[in-house]
Image (cartoon, helix red, strand yellow):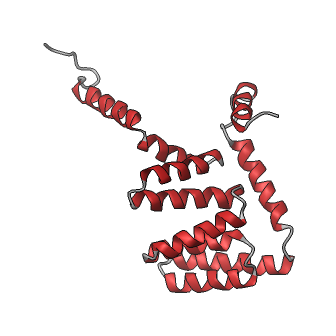
Amino acid sequence: MATINDQAVLQTIFHPNVPFDEDRQEEQEKQQLIQEGDFDPELLRQTTYLEAQGIAAAEEGDLELALEKFNQAIQLLPERASAFNNRAQALRLQGDVAKALEDLEAALKLSKGAGPVARQGFVQRGLIQRLQGQEEAARRSFEQGAALGSVFARRQLALMNPYAALCNQMLLELMRKSPPKGEKETC
């Protein structure tokens, strides 16, 4: 059985024009649909609607209403990871980082660390850990998010890499020193 990295290399070799992790993301989304098929369809419809209302309220800046909608969704289907992940985001925006982390851990546990909800959860957790100065924990969270296909997590890992930062700094310095396009360098 091939590892995830082996599969990624084979994917790149045999399908060079397909984005690196597109197949993996599609597979994860199919897996989530299968997992959500385990829920009562009517309860799933209601919780999805409540979450959409919560997300809209959060986007409009009404975090109290957003939290109310996410709480209702969790009451209806406490085994569904998505509402915990969304509530964690609202809690973080409200400044309650401790409760946000609790909800992220619940979301990651319920999602079994797989699929789009886990991908988002790992990224959110990594951001909080980084803001708290927990660089190594943040790195692990971003690595898990990146393994699930998060481009943002991969970018964060690159930014956290001291060698990449040094290379970027050197490249910027070189670009600053080189003459503008069309001008000749003078000594």
The x, y position of residue 173, in whole percent, is 26, 30
Residue 129's spot in the image, x, y percent? 46, 59
Instruction: Answer with left or right where residue 68 lies relative to residue 139.
Output: right
Q: Residue at x 34, y 33 (%)?
A: 166
Indicate the quadrant where residue 105 lies.
bottom right
Residue 152 visible to an observer of this rendering: no
Question: As drawn, is 50 to the left or to the right of 164?
Answer: right
Using the rendered view, name the quadrant where residue 19 is placed.
top right
Taking the spot 27% from the left edge, 20% from the top edge, the residue there is 182
- The residue lying at 66 percent from left, 37 percent from top is 20
Q: Nearer the viewer, residue 187 or 22?
A: 22
- Expressed as whole percent of the image width and height from the top left, the position of residue 117 reads 67, 61
In the rendered image, which quarter contains the N terminus? Answer: top right
Q: Residue at x 29, y 28 (%)?
A: 175
Where the C terminus falls, by quadrant? top left
Q: In this view of the protein, which residue sits in the foreground, 81 or 55?
A: 81
Residue 167: x, y in percent?
A: 36, 30
Pick the residue in front: 14 or 85: 85
Residue at the left extreme, as displayed: 187
Residue 70 vertical position relative to residue 23 in the rendered view, above or below: below
- How many labels were placed on the picture? 0
Query: Can residue 157 be seen from the camera position used here?
Result: yes
